[in-house]
């Protein structure tokens, strides 16, 4: 991952891009209608004129990954709602820019799900009705938390079989709503039956109560082929589905009773939204590794992208849940982010942490990340080279093309109501510092190179790490903890 995200780092260098309602009641009346227009009318027009379609098939086999095509949206309930609201009386005389700031925060599906109980007596009463405890592993705990706190809005539980099959095959819920990857709860327990209530546990702590609505045996081969594009165990996601997940999947609604205890703080979507500047663009930066110099260049310069408005901010939102086996542990990554946040202290950069379990699913996982960040209040999403990609554990070959995730995200962004900020390949040069690889080549600049493998060797040996590559504060944390 270091070789792709640091040595061949990503960089954004674009120009800088730059409302008023006719009364509060008019603004409120137009919010929903304008939201639909801003988020989806452009999509409908493109679909109806055959402009928007799935990305071109790449050499990596993305064609096998449940590609979303225009017809799926054109016949969906969302499409019909768009057509109705776009011509409704509520839209007459309303400037779209008047409500643009308000519409930036609309969650996926239109409403931020909150499944948490707060009243102790209600919690105690609910817990007393459960049939058995269900211990959650780290991945299941992440998914449970994102369901009950609204991160996976509009989901209100783990997917039943019909919804699961729809997401696997079409990348959509049965009502037409986009979802990149199925969110499921697995088990090998033969005693669990539909109709039971499970107390989902983090150790001895109850986190949620699940009403089991269905129990089914998934087609894991089909799931892996559609979600990851391959079925080989060389892919970490396929390996996880095949060897870690149980025989059965359980579907049903959740009610949250407590958030998990974590060594790194994970605010809910509502809490994160409350910290963000109202009415401003929020650019999300997803990462699963320590932030080095190239990463920092990437997300700070993203604010100069021509589609990011004045006063925009960046939300650095690392995943601190399970990732690949050889990735740096979440708690260590958290420490590196905290020292860098304190060192830079940039009011344009917000730092929060996401309890998400990585699948390394490339293009389809990019959609999942965009949905989650939309629920956390983001309006833009940085798509880097080979985002959420992985290599074969045998050959070292990439499973996805360098820009597969970027192209796939761009094709689905209008329907999601988010904008992508694509990144360019960045290299560090002796003569001019960080520049695009093309610029360096055209101007015969001398490129500095340091592979991820060499970086780790130097780290373990106590050798000096060049500051063009990594922040000293981050290196110090890594040396003390890895």
Image: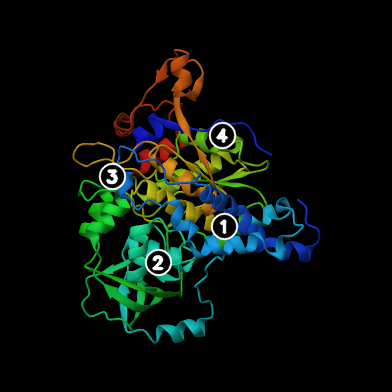
- Label 3 to label 2: alpha-carbon separation: 24 Å
Tags 1 and 3 in contact by the CB under 8 Å rule? no
Does label 1 or label 4 sit earlier along the sequence? 1
Neighbor class of circle 2 (other Cα within 10 Å; few <14, some 14-19, many 20+) is many
State the residue in front, 37 or 144: 37
Residue 321, position as x, y percentages in the image: 38, 55
- Distance in Å between CA atoms under marks 3 and 4: 29 Å
For this orientation, the residue located farthest to the top is 444
Residue indicated by mark 2: 144
Q: Which mark is residue 301?
A: 4
Position of 97 compared to 411: left or right? right
- Residue 301 placement: quadrant: top right
Disc 1: CA contacts within 10 A as few (<14), some (14-19) or many (>=20): some
First along the sequence among labels 3 and 2: 2
Mark closer to the chain start, 2 or 4: 2
- Label 3 or label 2, whichever lies nearer to me, is 2
From this viewpoint, is residue 286 visible? Answer: no
Q: Give the left or right position of residue 466, taking residue 373 as reference.
A: left
The residue pinned by badge 1 equals 272
Q: Image quarter for residue 207?
A: bottom left
Q: Say whether disc 3 or disc 4 marks the residue closer to the N-terminus.
A: 4
Residue 451 position in % (x across, y down) = 33, 29
Seen at 42% across and 74% down, the residue is: 254
Nearer-N-terminus badge (1/3): 1
Q: Residue at x 54, y 39 (%)?
A: 343
Q: Quadrant of the N terminus?
A: top left
Element type at mark 4: helix
Q: CA distance from mark 1 to mark 3?
A: 30 Å
Secondary structure under the numbered disc 3 in the rendered image: loop
Left or right of residue 280, residue 140 in this image: left
What whole-number distance in Å separates the C-alpha atoms at marks 1 and 4? 22 Å
Name the disc covering residue 326, or none.
Answer: 3
């Amino acid at each position: 991952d270091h070789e792709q995200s640091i040595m061949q780092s990503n960089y954004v260098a674009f120009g800088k891009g730059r409302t008023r309602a006719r009364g509060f009641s008019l603004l409120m009346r137009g919010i929903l209608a304008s939201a639909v227009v801003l988020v989806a009318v452009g999509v409908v027009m493109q679909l109806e004129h055959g402009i928007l379609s799935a990305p071109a098939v790449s050499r990596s086999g993305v064609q096998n990954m449940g590609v979303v095509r225009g017809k799926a949206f054109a016949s969906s309930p969302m499409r019909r709602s768009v057509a109705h609201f776009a011509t409704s009386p509520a839209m007459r005389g309303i400037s779209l820019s008047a409500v643009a700031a308000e519409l930036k925060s609309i969650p996926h599906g239109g409403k931020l799900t909150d499944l948490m109980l707060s009243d102790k007596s209600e919690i105690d009463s609910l817990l007393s009705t459960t049939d058995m405890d269900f211990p959650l592993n780290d991945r299941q705990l992440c998914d449970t938390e994102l369901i009950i706190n609204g991160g996976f809005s509009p989901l209100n539980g783990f997917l039943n079989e019909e919804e699961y099959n729809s997401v696997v095959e079409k990348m959509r819920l049965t009502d037409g709503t986009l979802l990149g990857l199925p969110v499921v709860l697995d088990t090998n327990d033969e005693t669990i039956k539909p109709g039971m209530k499970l107390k989902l546990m983090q150790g001895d702590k109850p986190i949620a109560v699940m009403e089991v609505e269905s129990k089914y045996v998934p087609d894991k081969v089909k799931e892996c082929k559609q979600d990851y594009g391959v079925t080989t165990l060389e892919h970490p996601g396929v390996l996880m589905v095949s060897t870690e997940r149980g025989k059965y999947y359980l579907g049903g609604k959740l009610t949250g009773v407590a958030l998990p205890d974590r060594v790194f703080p994970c605010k809910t979507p509502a809490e994160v939204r409350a910290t963000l500047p109202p009415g401003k663009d929020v650019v999300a930066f997803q990462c699963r590794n320590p932030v080095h110099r190239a990463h920092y260049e990437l997300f700070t310069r993203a604010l100069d992208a021509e589609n990011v408005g004045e006063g925009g901010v960046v939300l650095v939102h690392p995943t601190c849940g399970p990732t690949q086996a050889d990735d740096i542990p979440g708690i260590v990554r958290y420490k590196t982010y905290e020292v860098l946040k304190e060192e830079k202290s940039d009011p344009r950069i917000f730092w929060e942490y996401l309890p998400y379990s990585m699948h390394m699913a490339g293009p389809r996982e990019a959609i999942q990340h965009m949905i989650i960040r939309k629920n956390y209040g983001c309006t833009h999403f940085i798509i880097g080279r080979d985002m959420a990609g992985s290599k074969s554990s045998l050959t070292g070959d990439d499973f996805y093309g360098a820009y597969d995730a970027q192209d796939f995200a761009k094709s689905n962004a209008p329907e999601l109501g988010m904008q992508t900020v694509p990144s360019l390949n960045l290299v560090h040069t002796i003569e001019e510092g960080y520049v695009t690889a093309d610029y360096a080549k055209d101007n015969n600049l001398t490129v500095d190179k340091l592979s991820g493998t060499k970086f780790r060797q130097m780290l373990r040996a106590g050798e000096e790490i060049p500051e063009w590559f990594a922040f000293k504060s981050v290196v110090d944390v890594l040396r003390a903890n890895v």
